[in-house]
Image: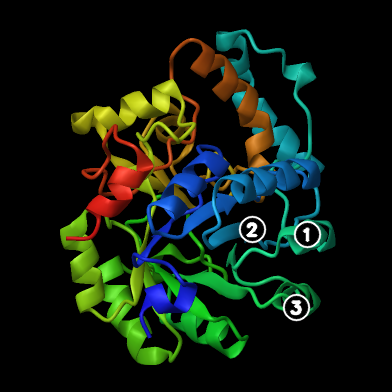
């Protein structure tokens, strides 16, 4: 079965959910162009999620995807948090940030019963997860209206685990992909494979459709992924310059500077491995650091530095998420970009 038949869409293209740089506008544009638009919900309150879903429903009658994280929130470690904030103190002083005004608590929440209640009001055709799957009772609630369930696998073992737990399709996320790694069975980065190595191995290991993600930026890379057995592709980085994205000024500027578009895996912005454009924070704290609090607690203390730096036009302390192949980034509408991905 093709991805088009599987999701009732025209093109085998899923727009990757990208929390922090998009809302409903990007998802709507991709849906109306014939792909599967996605709304990232990990950073949305129940009210904000309801508002965004209503906006999508008002602007398209096409299927769309809603994406959630499903991590287990860590216990707060006061000593580790205090040590991390102490490491950031010189930077607070440099930028004039009041250290005693910085809040505590996570900025990203896992899928829960409250989110499931909001989803039930809109019954999206597809619900996807990152970092494995939520509890069985939550999956059961999502299945009540017939939604397709997707999740990301970064290894063959993760793909087999997801299939055994009943997902309808698997996103094979290669090491090239921007943003957070979907890894959940192991945090060992040595287990991570490139997209073109991962996809055929996952295709051979499971019976459900496999969607390739990571380093896919144009029609030729879409064709290459599908030649390896992928039913379709998920594309994120290529959309970052589209007007429907809320990508910040410093982030857009970094993407446009081809000579500086070097990416690395880092945990300093959230506490979990993610790929972004190399910047000052990544160089001076990591890129991978044992000092940061567990995901998602690390992001709280660095967020004021990001806000202040961005107000000055700098991305020094921003998570400039991007994949290794930003060659497809263009300042065109998301609809134009989506259609250009198919030769």
In the shown orientation, is residue 333 left or right of residue 123? left
The residue wearing badge 3 is 144
Q: Residue at x 49, y 31 (%)?
A: 246
In the shown orientation, is residue 42 left or right of residue 19? right
Question: Between tags 2 and 3, which lies in front?
Answer: 3
**Residue 185 drawn at (x, y percent):** 56, 74
In the shown orientation, is residue 164 left or right of residue 273? right
**Residue 210 drawn at (x, y percent):** 40, 78
Q: Residue at x 76, y 79 (%)?
A: 140
Q: Which mark is residue 227?
A: none
Is disc 2 surrounded by few (<14), some (14 to 19) or many (20+) residues within 10 Å? many
Q: Residue at x 61, y 29 (%)?
A: 302
343 or 127: nearer the viewer: 343
Q: Which mark is residue 121?
A: 1
Is disc 3 surrounded by few (<14), some (14 to 19) or many (20+) residues within 10 Å? few
**Residue 130 drawn at (x, y percent):** 57, 63
Above or below 1: residue 189: above
Distance in Å between CA atoms under marks 2 and 3? 18 Å
Distance in Å between CA atoms under marks 1 and 3? 12 Å
Which quadrant does the N terminus fall into?
bottom left
Please, what secondary structure does the residue beneath circle 1 have?
A: helix
Q: What's the image's color scheme? A: rainbow
Q: Earlier in the sequence, mark 1 or mark 3?
A: 1
Q: Which mark is residue 68?
A: 2
Q: Residue at x 42, y 78 (%)?
A: 5
**Residue 286 drawn at (x, y percent):** 46, 40
Is disc 1 surrounded by few (<14), some (14 to 19) or many (20+) residues within 10 Å? few
Please, what secondary structure does the residue beneath circle 3 have?
A: loop
């Amino acid at each position: 079965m093709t991805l088009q038949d599987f999701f009732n869409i025209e093109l085998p293209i899923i727009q990757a959910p990208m929390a922090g740089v998009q809302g409903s506008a990007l998802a709507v544009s991709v849906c109306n162009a014939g792909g599967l638009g996605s709304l990232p919900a990990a950073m949305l309150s129940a009210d904000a999620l309801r508002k965004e879903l209503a906006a999508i429903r008002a602007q398209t009658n096409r299927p769309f995807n809603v994406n959630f994280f499903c991590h287990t929130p860590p216990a707060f470690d006061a000593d580790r948090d205090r040590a991390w904030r102490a490491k950031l103190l010189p930077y607070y002083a440099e930028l004039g940030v009041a250290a005693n005004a910085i809040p505590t608590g996570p900025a990203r929440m896992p899928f829960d019963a409250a989110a499931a209640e909001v989803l039930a009001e809109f019954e999206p055709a597809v619900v996807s997860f990152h970092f494995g799957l939520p509890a069985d009772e939550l999956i059961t609630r999502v299945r009540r209206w017939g939604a397709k369930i997707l999740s990301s696998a970064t290894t063959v073992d993760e793909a087999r685990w997801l299939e055994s737990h009943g997902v309808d399709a698997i996103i094979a996320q290669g090491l090239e992909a921007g943003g957070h790694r979907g890894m959940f069975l192991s945090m060992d980065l040595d287990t991570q494979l490139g997209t073109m190595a991962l996809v055929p191995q996952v295709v051979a290991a499971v019976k459900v459709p496999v969607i390739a993600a990571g380093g896919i930026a144009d029609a030729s890379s879409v064709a290459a992924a599908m030649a390896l057995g992928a039913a379709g592709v998920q594309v994120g980085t290529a959309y970052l310059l589209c007007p429907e994205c809320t990508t910040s000024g410093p982030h857009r500027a970094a993407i446009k500077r081809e000579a500086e578009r070097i990416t690395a895996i880092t945990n300093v912005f959230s506490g979990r491995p993610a790929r972004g454009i190399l910047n000052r924070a990544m160089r001076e704290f990591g890129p991978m650091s044992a000092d940061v609090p567990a995901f998602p607690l690390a992001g709280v203390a660095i967020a004021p530095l990001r806000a202040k730096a961005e107000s000055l036009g700098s991305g020094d302390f921003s998570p400039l998420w991007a994949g290794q192949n930003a060659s497809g980034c263009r300042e065109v509408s998301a609809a134009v970009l989506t259609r250009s991905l198919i030769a």
